[in-house]
Image (cartoon, rainbow, N blue to C red):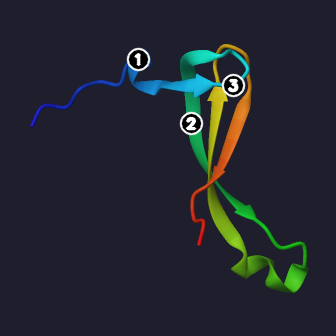
Amino acid sequence: MPIHPTTDRDRLEPCERCGDDTPHEVRIEIRTESTKRENAQFSREPYRIATCVVCGSESVLRMNNA
C-alpha cells in the first residue's frame, strides 16, 4: 500500500474566526482537570488542540467525553 505525503489540503479545517476552511496545526495534550492535588493523577484527559495557521484561533476538544 503506497504512503502518501501529507499536504496542506489534508489539514484543512473550518475556522470560525476566518469563516472558511483553513490550514491548521493539530496536537494532542494531556490536561489535568482536577484542582485538588490528591486527585490530579486520576483526572488527566486527552485534548485535541487545533490552531488556525492563518489567524491563530485555537479550538479545543476533549477526546474522552465519557
Q: Secondary structure at mark 2?
A: strand
Position of the C terminus, as image quadrant, is bottom right
Up-down relation of residue 55 to residue 57 (above or below):
above
- Residue type highlighted by circle 3: Glu
Asked if residue 1 is positioned above or below residue 6 in the image, the reply reads below
Circle 2 is placed at which residue position?
26
**Left or right, 29 with reference to 4:** right
Disc nearest the viewer among 1 and 2? 1
Label 3 vs label 1, nearer the camera: 3
Disc 3 crowd rating (10 Å Cα; few below 14, some 14-19, many 20+) is: few
Counting other residues with Cα less than 10 Å from the Cα at mark 1, is it few (<14), some (14-19), or many (20 or more)? few
Residue drawn at point x = 73 percent, y = 75 percent: 43
Of the image marks 2 and 3, the number of the one nearer the N terminus: 3
Q: CA distance from mark 2 to mark 3?
A: 16 Å
- Say whether residue 57 is left or right of residue 3: right
Q: Which residue is mark 1?
A: 9
The x and y percentages for residue 34 are 83, 73
